[in-house]
Image (tube, rainbow, N blue to C red):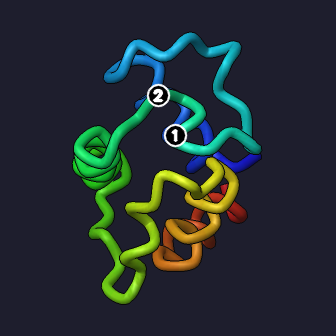
Amino acid sequence: MTSTYDTVKTALTSHFNIPADTVRADSTLEDLGLDSLAVVELLCVLQDELGMTVPTGHENLKSLQLTLAETVAIIDEAQPSARAAEVLA
């Protein structure tokens, strides 16, 4: 997985006290016990951690049914310069 995935996983475990062994790429945000308010809080944490802005036109990023892999893909797609930096590192 990408470092974006690691950042999302770290945010879930450290800010929402979700056990690391329950966080998997195919877990939905709902599976992890997040509600809509917690998803908004997660996006705020990710904005700070990744220096990103929530991409416009991706309101589905707030969906509880997204898996972590889907969430990471949307973030990486919206932040191509960050993804390129990861590839070059």
Type of amino acid under label 2: Gly
Give the tally of numbered discs. 2
Determine whether the residue tagged by mark 1 lies in a helix, strand or loop.
loop
Residue at x 67% of width, y 19% of height: 22
Q: Residues within 10 Å of mark 1 (few under 14, many from 20)?
A: some
Q: Is residue 70 left or right of residue 40?
A: right
Q: Which mark is residue 65?
A: none
Q: How far across and down, in percent of the image, does residue 51 sit?
A: 29, 58
Against 37, is 13 above or below?
above
- Nearer to the camera, 85 or 33: 33
Against 59, is 85 above or below?
above
Q: Marks 1 and 2, how far apart in space?
A: 5 Å
Instruction: Write down the residue under mark 2.
Output: 33
| Pointer 1 with pointer 2, Cβ within 8 A | yes
Q: How far across and down, in percent of the image, does residue 41 sit?
A: 23, 42
Q: Quadrant of the C terminus?
A: bottom right
Against 55, is 61 above or below?
above
Residue at x 76% of width, y 44% of height: 26
Type of amino acid under label 1: Glu
Instruction: Write down the residue under mark 1.
Output: 30
Q: How far across and down, in percent of the image, does residue 23 sit?
A: 65, 27
Q: Is residue 4 left or right of residue 50?
A: right
Q: How far across and down, in percent of the image, does residue 14 sit?
A: 39, 18
Residue at x 34% of width, y 47% of height: 39
Determine whether the residue tagged by mark 2 lies in a helix, strand or loop.
loop
